[in-house]
Image (cartoon, rainbow, N blue to C red):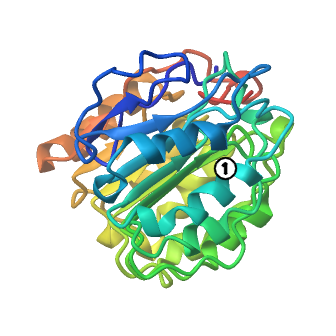
Amino acid sequence: MTVSTHKQELDGLPAFDFPDAEAEPEAKLPDAGSVAWRVSVDAYDSEEEWESAFARFLKAVDTTEVRALIVGSWSEAYDSEPEEVIAAILAASDRLPSLRALFVGDITYEECEISWINQMEIAPLINGLPRLHSFGVRGGQGLGMTGIKHERLRSLTVETGGLDADVVRNIGAAELPALEHLDIWLGVSWYGANTIVADLDPFLTGARLPALKSLALRNSEIQDDIAAALAGAPVVARLETLDLSMGTLGDEGAEALLAGQPLTHLKKLDLHHHYLSEPMQKRIRATLEPAGVVVDLSEGETSGRDDSRYTAVAE
């Protein structure tokens, strides 16, 4: 499966597409702080570069009020990294004093498959926007997250069809004392995923993430191993939300999770897109729902064979 739709919101604000260069000049724009602005260009043979569209955006909108920015497709994302995109945003940072949320790579499969999106070392962008509360990125090819240090970042999302273990380890080494929500799509080995459970240790202990309340380690072909590791992980006791969705979770992983530490303190357990048997689903509901835990067991798949399971997002 692939990513088929653009983001509908960011940081609680509805997404709004900044008009392209051919739009009517008198087109009415919403209040600058009322939407998450999506700036994008045609993915194939665009007549306008992303940074040119962004320059038009800076002129047309009261940028002092912009709270959320979504970077959509840049020209030929399948062949070029967003170097100019990142440079343009950093150059305009003083004109975006209210910017609190940024997502880079809101690109659908029709524009570029997730595992073909070229990324780059993105830590300078995160570190260069010290007022950010939320940051997300899509695409793991060439992605780097080395040396992240941010005092205010509360939410970090990394969406990939295959994430290199070096990136996982660098996220684990980041200095993010305010981080409350961490969401990592690990992906599959065919598209570069090579993480093992030991690489996830900083997230499982939670020692470097003292404010963490929501942990998503998902879209993984090692979902059973992750579930087993979380069964005794110290971080779980202080989580409100645990997300193991979109991957290959089967009865083995769920059994380990239920046999481990109590999960009845959670507000939500998200396991959607799974390979759990009906009896196991009933056990999970019977164990957690009476305690008030919201359990998402939607999108159950039928095959229980390990070799025929697949993640929700890969290519």
What residue does disc 1 label? 85
Q: Residue at x 49, y 79 (%)?
A: 150
Q: Under tag 1, what secondary structure?
A: helix
**Residue 253 visible in this rendered orientation of the protein:** yes
On screen, 252 above or below 23? below
Residue 70 left/right relative to 303: left
Residue 28 left/right relative to 92: left
Q: Residues within 10 Å of mark 1 (few under 14, many from 20)?
A: some
Q: Quadrant of the N terminus?
A: top right
Q: Quadrant of the C terminus?
A: top right
Along the viewing direction, whichever of 263 and 13 lies nearer the viewer:
13
Q: Residue at x 79, y 42 (%)?
A: 118
- The image shows residue 135 at horizontal and vertical percentages of 48, 57
The kind of residue on which mark 1 rests is: Val
On screen, 81 above or below 286? below
Residue 140 left/right relative to 211: right
Along the viewing direction, whichever of 264 and 271 lies nearer the viewer:
271
- The image shows residue 273 at horizontal and vertical percentages of 49, 27
Along the viewing direction, whichever of 3 and 48 lies nearer the viewer:
48
- The image shows residue 302 at horizontal and vertical percentages of 55, 15
Would you identify the image quadrant in which residue 64 lies?
bottom left
